[in-house]
Image (cartoon, helix red, strand yellow):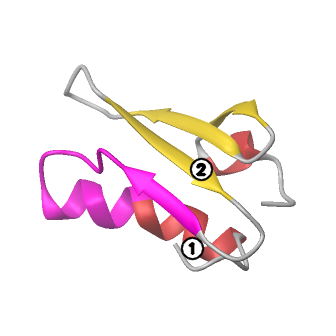
Amino acid sequence: MDVRWEDFGWERLAGGVGRRRLPVWDATAGLVAGGSAALLYDTGATLREGRSCGSRPRRSSAAGV
């Protein structure tokens, strides 16, 4: 991701690695993004939370999230 992680609600931890606290639940979603692929894990407790976690990185990354 070439953009600022914070602009999309994520905290940048290292190059290509970020996390996002999920509302309501005491849980954290994680994202590892590379040049050609990305891994999004722990996408929440509902389909809505999963879509929300995946939509921001998908819009801001060329990698297939």
Find residue 57 and report its horizontal and vertical position in percent.
59, 63
Find residue 64 and report its horizontal and vertical position in percent.
57, 80
Q: Secondary structure at mark 1?
A: helix
The reply to whether the magenta stretch includes residue 14 is: no
Residue drawn at 29 percent across, 44 percent down? 42
Residue drawn at 13 percent across, 46 percent down? 45
The reply to whether the magenta stretch includes residue 39 is: yes
Q: Quadrant of residue 46?
A: bottom left
Find residue 51 and report its horizontal and vertical position in percent.
32, 67
Q: Which residues are magenta?
A: 38-53
The three-letter amino acid code for the residue at tag 1 is Arg
Quarter holding the N terminus is bottom right
Residue with the mark numbered 1:
58
Indicate which disc, 2 or 1, sits on the residue closer to the N terminus.
2
Horizontal side of 56 relative to 27 (left or right) equals right
Horizontal side of 43 relative to 11 (left or right) equals left
Residue with the mark numbered 2:
32
Find residue 59 and report its horizontal and vertical position in percent.
62, 75
Q: Quadrant of residue 50?
A: bottom left
Q: Which of label 2 and label 1 is nearer to you?
A: 2
Please state which of residues 39 and 3 is positioned toward the viewer in this rendering: 39
Label 2 crowd (10 A; few <14 / some 14-19 / many >=20): some
Q: Quadrant of residue 37?
A: bottom right
Q: CA distance from mark 2 to mark 1?
A: 12 Å
Q: Secondary structure at mark 2?
A: strand
Residue drawn at 70 percent across, 69 percent down? 60
Count of residue discs? 2
